Image (cartoon, rainbow, N blue to C red):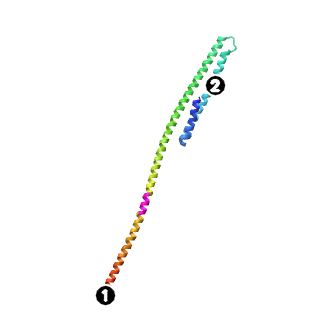
Amino acid sequence: LRQAKDLIRSMEVEVRSMDPGTKREMMEKVGQYKKTLESVQRDHADTQKQAEEEQNTLLCGSGQNNYGEASADQRGRLVAANETLDRGTGRIRHAMEIVAETEETALEISDELARNREKIESASARVRQVSDLTGHARRLVHSMTKREKHQKIMLGCVALFLVATAGVIIWLVAGGLRHK
């Protein structure tokens, strides 16, 4: 019974660390196991009390003069008490099996959650890498755009200078021809 209590406490602790959807379902199961264990404990206590009373009756005698009849009656009660103990023991075993199954399920869920956590952390790391690369690419594109604007301005200035120089040369040549 102590082991069953400890297992139920362990299950409650495990369930508290689960996600809300699974947590509700598992808490209901743990509650059922708790009720079953309490019922088994009551049956065990009642049966133990009955067995003690019957043992006291057997040891001290029932106060009747007819010992054969009392002895048969006491044997019947003892057999009934033993049957009740056997049923209680069966219930305890069943509860222990259920607790073991629930613990196994909780461990499987815990393992699955750990695997999911690893996947999420890995995906998060990849997102950070992609974000860093995107920032670097953005800065690179910005500097290339800035360089392109500077080159266009410089090309425009050179073209304007060449046109102005050609204009001055044409003006000088045309003006020099008029003077001759």
Examine the rendered structure and indicate whether residue 22 appears above or below residue 92: below
The image quarter containing residue 136 is bottom left
Q: Where is residue 166 shown, x and y percent of the image?
A: 33, 78
Q: Where is residue 143 shown, x and y percent of the image?
A: 42, 63
Q: Is residue 75 left or right of residue 138?
A: right
Q: Residue at x 46, y 47 (%)?
A: 122
The image quarter containing residue 176 is bottom left
Q: Amino acid at mark 2?
A: Asp
Q: Residue at x 48, y 40 (%)?
A: 112
Q: Residue at x 66, y 18 (%)?
A: 56
Is 137 covered by the magenta stretch? yes
Residue wearing tag 1: 178
Is 171 covered by the magenta stretch? no
Q: Amino acid at mark 1?
A: Arg
Q: Is residue 76 left or right of residue 118?
A: right
Callout 1–callout 2 Cβ contact below 8 Å: no
Mark number for residue 138?
A: none
The image quarter containing residue 37 is top right
Stretch in magenta: 136-143
Q: Where is residue 80 shown, x and y percent of the image?
A: 61, 20
- Relative to the observer, which residue lies in front, 133 or 54? 133
Q: Residue at x 38, y 72 (%)?
A: 156
Within 10 Å of disc 1 (Cα), the crowding (few <14, some 14-19, many 20+) is few
Residue wearing tag 2: 46
Within 10 Å of disc 2 (Cα), the crowding (few <14, some 14-19, many 20+) is some
Residue at far bottom of view? 180
Q: Where is residue 169 shown, x and y percent of the image?
A: 33, 80
Q: Tell me the element at label 1.
A: helix
- Relative to the observer, which residue lies in front, 152 or 11? 152
Q: Is residue 168 left or right of residue 103?
A: left
